[in-house]
Image: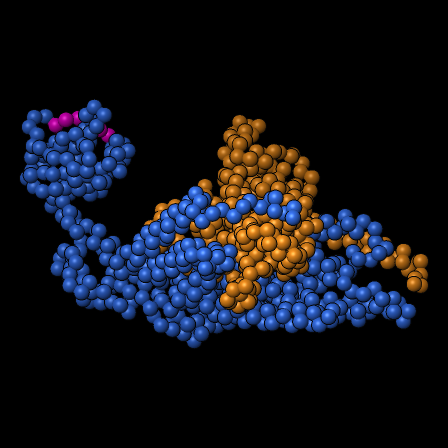
Amino acid sequence: MVEDQKSIRLRKILAHGFMIGFIILIMFPFLMVISISFREGNFSTGTLLPQNPTLEHWWLAFGIPFERPDGTIIQPPFPVMLWLWNSIKIALITSAGILALSTTAAYAFARMKFRGRGAMLDTLLIIQMFPGALTVIAIYAIFDALGQVVPWLAIDNHPALILTYLSAITLHIWTIKGYFESIDPAIDKAAQIDGATPWQAFRYIFLPLSLPILAIVFILSFIFLINEYPIASVLLRQSDNMTLAVGARQYLYEQKYLWGDFAAAAILSGLPITLIFLFAQKFLISGLSDGGVKG
Amino acid sequence: MTLSATIPATSSRFSLRGLLGKALIVLAGFGFLYLASGLYLLGEPLFALVAFAVGALGVVFFWSPRFYTLRFVYPAIAAVFLFILLPVVYTSAIGFTNYGSRNLLTLERVQAYHMSQRVTDPASKRPFGLVAEGDGFRIFLPEDAARPALLTTVISGAQVTALPLSGPPPETLPIKAIIQNKALLATLTIDTPNGPLTQSGLRAFASSQPAYTPGENDTLIAADGTVLTPDPDQGLYVTPEGEAVPPGWRVGVGFANFKKVLLSDGIRGPIFKVFVWTTVFAFLSMVFTFAVGTGLAVILEWRHLRFAGLYRVLLILPYAVPAFISILVFRGLFNQNFGEINLILSTVFGISPEWFTNPNLARAMLLLVNTWLGYPYMMLLAAGFLQAVPQDLYKAAALEGSGSVRNFFAITLPQILPPFVPLLISNFAFNFNNVVLILLLTGGGPDMPGTLVTVGRTDLLGSFTFRLAFQNSGQDFGMAGAISTLIFIVTGAIAYYNFKAMQKYAAKKGAGHG
């Protein structure tokens, strides 16, 4: 290829300049939040490097009362660590459940013949786009009724939320099914000849062979669940029961605006999730291009 | 075969595990039966039927070897049915009722509520004091004009007897003790010579009677003889004068909610505006994220660019941080009075835009934030699709002396667009219903003035409906259900179209390779 050395150098400078400028713009919110979390008070403004850095917001985010130099003791406004624990607990349990439901279904769709198979698969793909936020009225009504028969399924209980989230499997069934179909049919044929039931073939052959895709599905659903707001905001009412996504909003009400406290809590709770994502992003990219939309 | 070693021998039919399995199935069956009958008794026949059907099918599938295959799919399909399909259908059904904060209960529960109300007889009211007796308490009712002083036995259980007291009145405890024992006193009945008394207010006991007694045909007869008749059209009890007595129950109202949404002037106008903005928002979000994401991906692909890996990780960050945190961060940064963005703008340019009160600025802010949130996803996708573009095309173009901009529009874009289309459509559908962004960033505001229901200038159809159902004072589930139904139809159409587009693309790709 014929390319002018001088023009390439100019274009290189332009490209790097653009990238660095764009990244600074993109990173601005993150840098601001880090700076704000070390500032004094909840309203004060200041430079990017705080003049009188304080750990007050960080102590409060960890749930430890903070003593100011003048002796006043500030109590943590919200149970951030409890919210984080609730979020992680719900996301872990549900992701495990989602994995169990979607692998078994995907196995049947990939390897078994039964009536309505094609129609069910197509329906799953279309259902996947329906907005969950709009069915909350019905979900609220369902658990309002269920709770009067079985108290632990009532509104404001985590099992109600977990049960609802278990339905977020439509896309995962498709993803895992695609992976299962790529496994050589000769393997399960051989197992069958040796007397293995389909369940045994699934449990001892398919599951061990598809660990990578199971990890992707687990992480994708974990991230989705951590982020879910509308359903959780309707089903969870008491402060102690809230997930992070529902609780975090409470920092920024007009009447009670805790900007500094929010900044520290946001970093503290966002960091582990961000790290999980960055760690897993190489695996995730292939899963994403199969049609998953983060939501 | 080496595989056989890892597979345990098939268990015999009457093994312990088999029995345990059957026992579990029976147990689960009884669980569902209990749930179904409970729901039926509660007055929820639809939920009862669904619970029964789901349980019965489950028991049949897991019991009979004939349905072995279905055991694998059934739990997943049941979950999708119960918590996606049923809610969609039920939400639509609610659209045909007047379900809302005013008509929240079932007829049975409304009757039970009315019947549990009591009216007190003011003449029987008498003050009381709490008297300590060891660890327990007695209740002292002081003497008044018509009645002698009474002292009860020590309280144990829900009923005590009061006996006339001669002699000096005992020492009573301060009001604090009454407040501390509120729960105990609230359920207590005192038997006196003039009949039973229950607590009436914090400081007095009085005799009370049910406010209503049941009459014929579900009517209720009030203590003063007024007859309340149930009005099946409104779902409320009404007095003979036609005055409604809340609370009400759910009744069907036919297409009334749909008519309101589609025909009534006060609502149709704002909803149409919301619909237009929803479409514009979803379309522009899709275009902006696609443009920024693809642009960045193309630059990162350039083989002369060093540090591309580092740039890529930094550019993905907005996608890696949980969205609800980023959105709330932007909510703070854009704050009109002490947000950092306005701080910078006012020092540099001397302006301080009203991001949350000016509708156009609020919309611009939403698009800006949504582009920030969404471009990394597009960038990742584009990077994947760029790998599939044949390099020969660029070589040929270079020989022709084509520039990079022309290369992009003549080669890259036409090559990556077809596989992108289904994903762009899902992205459109996702943003069409991007309720979380709106609820967390603007909350729908600023509100349009002079509308019958609260409608915000930045509301999407979804967030508007969500607020109608859960945030505004008059929770109107019926109307929200009707609008949701319309949204389901729109989303369903998009989803179906997308599905067809994907099938077409898959067929084309298959044909191309085959």
Residue B218 image-quadrant placement:
bottom left
Residue appearing at x 63%, y 47% in the figure: B3
Whether residue B143 is visible, yes or no, is yes
Quadrant of the drawing holding the C terminus of chain B:
bottom right
The colour scheme applied to this rendered structure is by chain
Asked whether B255 or B493 is in front, the reply is B493
Residue B185 image-quadrant placement:
top left
Q: Chain A's shade in the image?
A: orange
Q: Give coordinates of residue B87: x percent, y percent.
A: 44, 61
Q: Residue furthest top?
A: B134
Residue B170 inside the magenta-drawn segment = yes
Q: Is B409 situated above or below B106?
A: below
Q: Give coordinates of residue A251: x percent, y percent.
A: 52, 45
Residue appearing at x 24%, y 30% in the figure: B174
Asked whether B411 or B363 is in front, the reply is B411
The chain coloured blue is B
Asked whether A112 or B390 is in front, the reply is A112
Side of A34 relative to B158 (left or right): right
Total residue callouts: 0
Q: Main secondary structure of the magenta part?
A: loop
Asked whether B1 or B435 is in front, the reply is B1
Residue B251 image-quadrant placement:
bottom left
Residue appearing at x 20%, y 54% in the figure: B115
Residue interval drawn in magenta: B169-174
Side of A131 relative to A182 (left or right): left
Side of B321 relative to A118 (left or right): right
Q: Is B216 situated above or below A154?
A: below
Q: Give coordinates of residue B36: x percent, y percent.
A: 34, 55
Whether residue B452 is visible, yes or no, is no
